[in-house]
Amino acid sequence: MQKKEEFLKIFSIKLRGVIRRMNIDFERLQEIRLRVDRPLMILWNGREFFVRPSGEITPDCEEGLLVEKKELMETMEYISNFSMYAYEDEIRQGFLTIQGGHRIGIAGKIVMEGDRIRSVKHISFINVRLSHQRMGCADQVLPYIIRENEICHTLIISPPKCGKTTLLRDLIRQISNGTPFYHGCTVGVVDERSEIGGSYLGVPQNDLGIRTDVLDCCPKAEGMMMLVRSMSPVVIAVDEIGDYRDINAIESVIHCGCKLLTTVHGSSMEEVQHKPLLQKLIRERVFERYVVLHNRQRIGQIREIFDERGTDIYKNAC
């Protein structure tokens, strides 16, 4: 992982020493989880492991280093540059993004103000999700989502932690920059949870291409229409369709002539077809390509690619 030492500085002095000693490929490290009085845990190469005080990883939770409250609080101080108040808005959402595009999820006692969350106190759980940009991981997919020199409306279907955001990120980069067989075009990204661009102070830390504009920490439904009105995108990309407001915005975007790239959780085409949220779009053949992922051998591996009629064009091509 690039700039590993800078990344390690967000942890308490004790924890950074333990993590530094882990004899693993950091490019395959996906998550580091800290829970008060629970063993230090990582997600590496799609599998969960616990970390011994020596830095060795083990599947045995009994051997994992117990994370103390003081270690977690010291880590939060480093993450927030000793100013939790400055990150109050981000903390209220349950996550914040740090330099390098890494996302820090937090949980603890929620303080309400009427019907809205005012703050999170007594933070006792931290999930550090590492941002990895895999240049070229979309090489195999891109030819399937281009038709007559135009991007197809595409839905990426993936179980959790199988690389859908990583794939989406590289598709955005290549579509924006252009390739030997595609000219490149303007892409608008609504990055509601700062996971696609990993923006820090408004600047994407991940390479999203030379023709890409990003709305960071913006709700998808509002952001899609903002981009249409202000930035004239040819393609709009969003991660994880969430509710019917997103669906309504998607329909508006498509009616405006923009192409759409988006993702949804699911293990198969059949599962997605039974989601009430998506049934109308599928029935009306709004999406022209469905890319189904799995991680049996590696993260982001293509399982199937379907066209709007439900024909598996990837399997047929192979």
Image: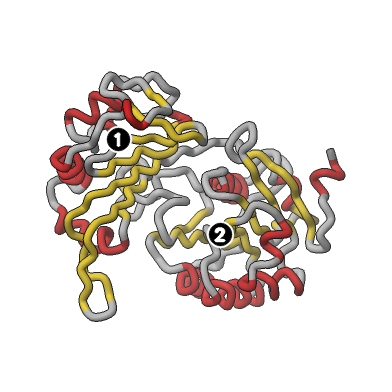
Of tags 2 and 1, the one toward the viewer is: 1
**Residue 29 in view of the camera:** yes
Q: Residue at x 17, y 30 (%)?
A: 13
Which of 20/216 is in front?
Answer: 20
Residue 185 in the image: above or below residue 245: above
Identify the residue at image location x=33%, y=29%: 62
The residue most toward the front is 62
User: Quick one: SS at disc 1?
Assistant: loop
Residue under numbered circle 1: 39
Position of residue 156 measured from the top left corner of the image (x, y, whole percent) = 64, 54
Q: Is 55 situated above or below 173?
A: above
Sequence order check: which comes first, mark 2 or mark 1?
Answer: 1
From the image, tell me which residue sits under label 2. 237
At 21% from the left and 65% from the top, the residue drawn is 119
Looking at the image, residue 122 sits to the left or right of residue 169; the answer is left
In x, y percent, where is residue 107?
28, 55
Q: Within 10 angstroms of label 1, few (less than 14), some, or many (20 or more) residues?
A: many
The tag on residue 70 is none
Please tell me which residue lies in front, 107 or 12.
107
Of the 4 image quadrants, the one containing the N terminus is top left
Image location of residue 268, percent across then percent down: 69, 53
Figure disc tally: 2
User: Which colouring convention does the figure follow?
Assistant: secondary structure
For badge 2, the amino acid type reads: Ala
- Across and down, in percent, residue 174 comes to 60, 45
What amino acid does circle 1 point to? Answer: Pro
For residue 201, side relative to residue 223 (left or right)? left
Indicate the quadrant containing the C terminus: top left, top right, bottom left or bottom right.
top right
Q: CA distance from mark 2 to mark 1?
A: 37 Å
Instruction: Tell me which residue sits at (64%, 43%) in the image.
Output: 294
Q: Residue furthest right?
A: 316
